[in-house]
Amino acid sequence: MKLIAAFLASVAFAVPGFSAPAAHVDTVDPSVPTQLPRTAIPHHYAITVTPHAERLTFDGSVAIDLEVIKPTTQLVLNAAEMSISSARLEPAKGGAALIGHVTLDAKAETATLTFPRTLPTGSYRLTLAYAGKIHTQANGLFALDYKNAEGKDARSLFTQFEAADARRFFPGWDEPDYKATFDLTAQVPANTMAVGNMPAASTRALPDGLKEVRFQTTPTMSSYLLFFADGDFDRITKPAAGREVGIVMSRGNGPKGHLALDAEAEILPYYDQYFGTPYPLPKLDNVAGPGQSQFFGAMENWGAIFTFEYALLNDPAITSEAGRQSIFGVEAHEMAHQWFGDLVTMDWWGDIWLNEGFASWMANKATQHFHPEWGADIDHVAAREAAMGQDSFRSTHAVVQDVRTVEQANQAFDAISYSKGESVLSMLEGFAGPDVWRSGIQGYIKKHAYQNTKTEDLWNAMESVGAKGLGTIARDFTTQPGIPLIQVGASQCVGGNTVATLSQSQFSSDQRSQVEARPLAWHVPVRASAGGAASQVVTQGPTTQVQVAGCGPLLINAGQTGYYRTLYQPIQAQALERAFAGLSPVDQYGVMSDQLALSNTGYQPMAVGLDFLSEIPANANSKLVQAAVRQWSSLYDSLESDPAAQSAIVNRVIKVYGPRMQQLGFAPRAGEPAVDALLRSTLISTLGKFKDPAVVAEAKRLFAEWQTNSDAIPGSLKETWLGVVARNADESQWNAIHAKAQAAAGSVERTSLYQLLGATDDDKLARRALDLALTDEPGKTTSAGIITQVAGGHHRMAVDFVLAHLAQVNQLVDISGRSRFMQRLAGGSNDASLIPTLETYANANLATSDRKPVDQAIDRIRFEAGKLPRVRSETAAWLQAHPA
Ligand SMILES: [Zn+2]
């Protein structure tokens, strides 16, 4: 591999004529929701953009080859935050051009072009000249500012279009079903590097220190996948299976890109093979941008993935082991989209889970394949738990959603689309078997390449390769919300087999009696074991018999791929607990999480869940110990009014897991298992939160040394140790972190240090952090991160602050994420007094159709507050009865 300064080739470039749509007019599926009248269909866009980075504006022109499919006097297309100075329509077969009168509708985000006479059906070229705005958050064309290698202020430009922000970059049919080809031309400073979906076709010098870069024509694709970036970049490359993979980053950061580049090069051929259709573009870049969004880390633009630096670059000064693993995972996710999403695209945002659930599932598969030592099978179960955390409330929704507005499309990117999607796909793969499943995926990709699909197309592809019965299960889990509850009846040993009756209802955190009276019904594939081989049965109706080889403890959901909760008889739970040490780590993790969730929601006493939690010894699988320590930490938070119970938890964690901390040591060890490095970080954070004297003393020692020696804290533990310091900081320590943030060289480290200022337990310092967030000092994309940090320990303070400065805070958050920012700040709280505050906020600021995230936060706060008395008293009693 080699580092090159520019990658623009000078290849002769033929300006395309009118594309020839007559042969196959895609009439666009009339059942797909749309905000645009179905009168015309675009086939090809030729866009020229001239950014004025210093003024945060750009000029653009676009020539759209389109087909009018219904006679009309008007063409309506998407356009937002732009002015259109001319609209000219030429019939393809020749004849006089028509000039359109332009009316913009800011609310609908449309431009209506009215022509002096009716346009007959047929082919046209529509040419528009326009001017738009460069944003400072990740919407449309946006700028990210940073200090360059020489410490000077620098600015790079990037685009972010999903779900509906391409319309801020060019006027067009900005809905995923309107696929077209794109020619992008950019007029940029001669000394910068421009990046597009495709390699450059040609570049030529322009007057005034500019150059013009023309990119090759893209394949047919949706508008949200178009990409453009321009900046003072380096690009490193590697060949991979006949294509070129590359990482693009601000100049001087090349060495930090090699981890990601190597991962990209190994994942590409693996995906070629898995999908059975090779990656169709000549190159695949992953472009790093300094800064962050509160809502996404990376975006799968076809051929030019965008990823924020912290999620792509491996910086020895700040990247943790978790960060390094996440670089692989994020890249594997975005690369899976190059097929699932880019080559085959959902026809409307209601099916966004097809993209996100699949990419999440596929990234986990790639991680397990290349890094079995990372324990990613447990991450699958963690995804199930994350999904159920949203799916057990009345405000949840089905995987396949009803999306009508742009805001609803933005909100569709949530734990249901990603994590429930991933979990349901795991369950279905388990049902079909990995070989049948994969051949179904391959058939689906082949059949629908360059086109759009609905969820149903995937089930049809699976059934057509032999996954009989899969569609019934899949439809139950994707078209209805919620979680099945499997209750195990008394089990018997009959002739060496365990026989039990499973009753099925629905699990709920906040409407248990309603769902018990009228539960939804699912066909649930249940895998069970009892000491012998596991067997599988699909539930039919309210009760189902299961017969399993062996008469050992009965384990339901063996392997943990099922998306349901399991309520055992007390005697069965006790038997399973006694056999717990013999279960696989993934089953241990799944059973412990499942049983704690049932205890937390009141389906069974807290003691059952706590008994399982206490079964995880210090020498267990590192990921399990991590999970156990986190569970205790969250119970500690619930017991805030009971210092005696809290110190019982502290004593227990220190006594049980302290030896593991000692064994791991406070510093990373060369060649140690990656999961041990993760566990070390979790133990330091949690023991630091519990003010364990040894951990606090080491944090103080490292912090003092770091004042004079920047290398005193190992980079991979910097956020961990400084997190302990920041949480317990006094004013002078807080000031010292602030000074280090101001002086930090790398943008990732700088952002991280600024955010730590919000992680303080101290009210007065938390207020200072909030005030700092509203100044220009931290930087445009850092400030919202500080507010989010403050919310972690001071929900009420952060929410009140944001409400008092709403207009200012809105400028610090992506447009597409604003309605979710309040959910992010308040959703983790158990303070019921926030509920009326959130109601008032939603009534004043959100349309009825767009309040789902706030409703979800309210449901969760109500549940957390409501369960506290029972959880506190039962947990305190259990702790007393079970001294560590
Ligand atoms: Zn994704």
Image: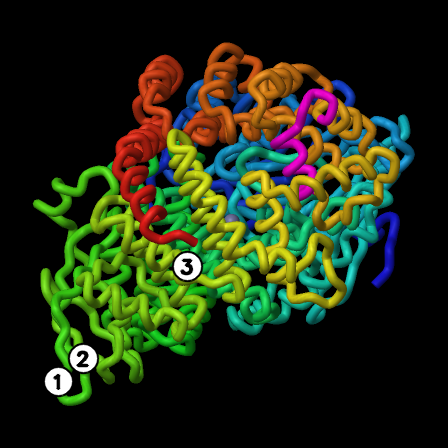
Q: Is residue 821 above or below residue 547?
A: above
Residue 728, magenta (yes or no): yes
Structural distance between the alpha carbons of marks 3 and 1: 32 Å
Q: Nearer the viewer, residue 618 or 628?
A: 618
Query: Residue lying furthest top in this view?
Result: 804
Q: Is residue 277 above or below residue 811?
A: below
Q: Nearer the viewer, residue 40 or 208?
A: 208
Prevailing secondary structure class for the magenta stretch in the rendered image: helix
Residue extent of the magenta highlight: 719-733
Disc 2 marks a residue whose amino acid type is Thr
Disc 3 marks a residue whose amino acid type is Val
Specify whether tag 1 is near ligand 1 (CB below 8 Å): no
Q: Are marks 2 and 1 in contact (CB under 8 Å)?
A: yes
Are there few (<14), some (14-19), or many (20+) residues within 10 Å of tag 1? few
Image-quadrant location for residue 270: bottom right
Asked whether, in this view, residue 381 is left or right of residue 16, the answer is: left
Query: Residue 498: which disc?
Result: 2
- Mark yes or no: residue 121 visible: no
Q: Which residue is mark 3?
A: 381
- Mark yes or no: residue 154 visible: yes
Q: Is residue 620 above or below residue 360?
A: below
Residue 644, magenta (yes or no): no
